[in-house]
C-alpha cells in the first residue's frame, strides 16, 4: 500500500537535476532509466569517430593513448573525394583525414611544440595504433626513399665536379669548382642528418613519449607559461628562441627549407622593441640552397644591401655573421625568436605588448620601416575594434571543447562535430572564452565529414540548447552603445 503513495524526489545525477514524481517503484524505474540513458549517451560520445579532445582520447583509449609523429605531407589535401562513394563530401582532403574517415578512427591533433620540423603530433587510441602505424610507415618509406635519392644525386654531382676540378685551367675556375664541391658536401651532410632522423623515427614507430613531447617546448614560452604558448599555437604557432649561431648557419639542403621559403629572426630591445631580419631561400643552378638576408639600419631605417651566404663555408659565414647582426642592431649573445612566414610574423607582432612611448629618439634599436609597420597594425586594430565589438559575442565553454582540427585551425566541438575558425579570448584549465560574430559564417564539419555553414547566432543558440540542464552558458553580448 505504501508503494502506491505518490512521492516527489529531487535527483542530481552527473550534474543534471531531475524532479521525479510517482510511486516508489516508478521512481526506482525512472532512476534506472536515467542512469542507462547517461551511460548510453556517454558511450555513443566516446565511440564517435573523428577529431576529438585530449580528454576524450584518454578516456576512450584502452591503455595510455600514444602520441605519434605523423609526416607533414600526410596533411596535404591531395585526395579528391567528389566521386568517392566510400566518403561523403566533395573537394580535396588529406590522406590522414581520408584514412581516418574510412576506418572510423578517433584522434586528437596536439599543439605542435616543435613547428620547425616536418612532423605533426597526434594522440590516438591505443587500440588503433596498428592502423595508424601502417599508414605512417607507408609515408615514412616514401620519405626515406626520397632522401636516399637526394643522397645519390649529391654523390653524382660531387663526382662530376671533382672531374671538372682535375681539368680546371685557371686558379679562378679551380676556386669556383672547389666552392661548388664544398657546398654540395654541406648539403649532402645535412640531407644525411635528415635521412638518419627519418630512419630513427621509423625504428620507434614514430612514437613520441609524452615527456619527450613536452620537452619539444624547450626554448619557447611553453617552459614558463604553457597557457600562453598554447594560445600562441592558435595564431602564429609556438615561437621558439635560438642563439644566432644556432639558427643563422648556412642551409644547403632543400629538405631544411620551410614551405614559405622565408624565415624572420626577431630580437627585442630593452624597451621591448622588436628588431627583425628577413631570410629568403634561393636555389642555384646546382640545386644547392643559399640564403639572402634583408637588413634595415636600426637608426636611420635605410635598407642595407642584401647579404647572401652563397659561396661561404660555414666557418667563413660565422665570421661574417657579427657584421650582419651589427647592421640590424642585434646582439649575438642574445636569443632570437624565429617565425617562418610573413603572416606568422604579423600574428607574432600582434601578440606582443610592444611599447613605443618609452623608446628613445636617439640611438633606439628599431628600424623606421618596422616601426611604421607595427604602428600601422596598432592603428588598424584600434580603428576596427569599436566596429567589431558591436557584432561580436563572447561565450564560456568547457576547455575540452576547444581543439585544433585536421587543418590545425582552432575549432569548437559542437554536436560531435567541429566549428572552424572561432576566436579564442582566454582559457584556463577548466573553461575557455571564445568570441563569435553574430552575422559571420562558420564552417561546421560533422562526424560524418559533411560540411555546412552556420552563422554565429546559430552557433550561440546551439550551445545554449545543448546544455540540457548542465551549467548554463553565460553569454555577454556586446552591442553598439551598450555597456
Image (cartoon, helix red, strand yellow):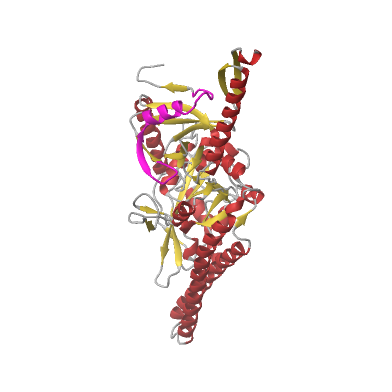
Residue 342 in the image: above or below residue 259: above
Is 468 covered by the magenta stretch?
Answer: yes
Q: Residue 169 appears at what percent x and percent y?
A: 43, 86
Q: Quadrant of the N terminus?
A: top right
Q: Residue 263 appears at what percent x and percent y?
A: 46, 53
State the image quarter where residue 57 is shown: top right
Q: Residue at x 45, y 37 (%)?
A: 350
Q: How many marks?
A: 0
**Closest to the observer, 36 or 150:** 36
Q: Residue 430 appears at what percent x and percent y?
A: 58, 31
Q: Residue at x 49, y 78 (%)?
A: 158
**Which contiguous range is marked in magenta?**
445-473
**In this view of the protein, can residue 286 be seen by the observer?**
yes
Q: Residue 47 appears at what percent x and percent y?
A: 54, 44
Q: Residue at x 39, y 58 (%)?
A: 78
Residue 102 in the image: above or below residue 184: above
**Closest to the observer, 281 or 301:** 281
Residue 405 in the image: above or below residue 324: above
Q: Residue furthest front?
A: 1
**In this view of the protein, can residue 331 be seen by the observer?**
no
**Closest to the observer, 170 or 404:** 404
Q: Quadrant of the C terminus?
A: top left
Amino acid at each position: 500500500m505504501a508503494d502506491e503513495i505518490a512521492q516527489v524526489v529531487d535527483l542530481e545525477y552527473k550534474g543534471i537535476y531531475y524532479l521525479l514524481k510517482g510511486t516508489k517503484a516508478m521512481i526506482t524505474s525512472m532512476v534506472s532509466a536515467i542512469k542507462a540513458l547517461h551511460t548510453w549517451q556517454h558511450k555513443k560520445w566516446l565511440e564517435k569517430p573523428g577529431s576529438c579532445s585530449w580528454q576524450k582520447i584518454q578516456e576512450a583509449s584502452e591503455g595510455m593513448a600514444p602520441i605519434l609523429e605523423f609526416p607533414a605531407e600526410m596533411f596535404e589535401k591531395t585526395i579528391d573525394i567528389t566521386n568517392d562513394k566510400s566518403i561523403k563530401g566533395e573537394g580535396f582532403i588529406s590522406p590522414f583525414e581520408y584514412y581516418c574517415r574510412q576506418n572510423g578512427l578517433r584522434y586528437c591533433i596536439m599543439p605542435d611544440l616543435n613547428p620547425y620540423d616536418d612532423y605533426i603530433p597526434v594522440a590516438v587510441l591505443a587500440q588503433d595504433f596498428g592502423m595508424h602505424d601502417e599508414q605512417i610507415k607507408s609515408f615514412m618509406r616514401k620519405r626515406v626513399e626520397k632522401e636516399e635519392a637526394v643522397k645519390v644525386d649529391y654523390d653524382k654531382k660531387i663526382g662530376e665536379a671533382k672531374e671538372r676540378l682535375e681539368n680546371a685551367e685557371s686558379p679562378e675556375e679551380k676556386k669556383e669548382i672547389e666552392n661548388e664541391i664544398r657546398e654540395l658536401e654541406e648539403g649532402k651532410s645535412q640531407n644525411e642528418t635528415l635521412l638518419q632522423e627519418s630512419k630513427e623515427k621509423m625504428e620507434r614507430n614514430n612514437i613520441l613519449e609524452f615527456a619527450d613531447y613536452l620537452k619539444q617546448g624547450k626554448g619557447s614560452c611553453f617552459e614558463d607559461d604553457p597557457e600562453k604558448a598554447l594560445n600562441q599555437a592558435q595564431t602564429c604557432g609556438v615561437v621558439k628562441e635560438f642563439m644566432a649561431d644556432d639558427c643563422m648557419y648556412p642551409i644547403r639542403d632543400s629538405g631544411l627549407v620551410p614551405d614559405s621559403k622565408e624565415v624572420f629572426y626577431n630580437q627585442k630591445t630593452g624597451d621591448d622593441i622588436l628588431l627583425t631580419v628577413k631570410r629568403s631561400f634561393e636555389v642555384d643552378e646546382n640545386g644547392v640552397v643559399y640564403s639572402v638576408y634583408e637588413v634595415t639600419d636600426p637608426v636611420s631605417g635605410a635598407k642595407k644591401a642584401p647579404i647572401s651566404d652563397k659561396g661561404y663555408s660555414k666557418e667563413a659565414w660565422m665570421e661574417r655573421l657579427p657584421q650582419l647582426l651589427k647592421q640590424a642592431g642585434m646582439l649575438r649573445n642574445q636569443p632570437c625568436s624565429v617565425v617562418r612566414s610573413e603572416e606568422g610574423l604579423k600574428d607574432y607582432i600582434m601578440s606582443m605588448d610592444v611599447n613605443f612611448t618609452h623608446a628613445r629618439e636617439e640611438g633606439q634599436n628599431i628600424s623606421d620601416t618596422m616601426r611604421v609597420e607595427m604602428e600601422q597594425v596598432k592603428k588598424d586594430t584600434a580603428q576596427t575594434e569599436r566596429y567589431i565589438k558591436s557584432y561580436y559575442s563572447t561565450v564560456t565553454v568547457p576547455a575540452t571543447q576547444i581543439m585544433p582540427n585536421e587543418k590545425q585551425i582552432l575549432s569548437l566541438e559542437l554536436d560531435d562535430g567541429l566549428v572552424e575558425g572561432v576566436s579564442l579570448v582566454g582559457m584556463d584549465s577548466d573553461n575557455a572564452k571564445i568570441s563569435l560574430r553574430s552575422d559571420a559564417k562558420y564552417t561546421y564539419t560533422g562526424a560524418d565529414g559533411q560540411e555546412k555553414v552556420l552563422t554565429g547566432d546559430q552557433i550561440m543558440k546551439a550551445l545554449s540548447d545543448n546544455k540540457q540542464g548542465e551549467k548554463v552558458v553565460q553569454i555577454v553580448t556586446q552591442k553598439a552603445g551598450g555597456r
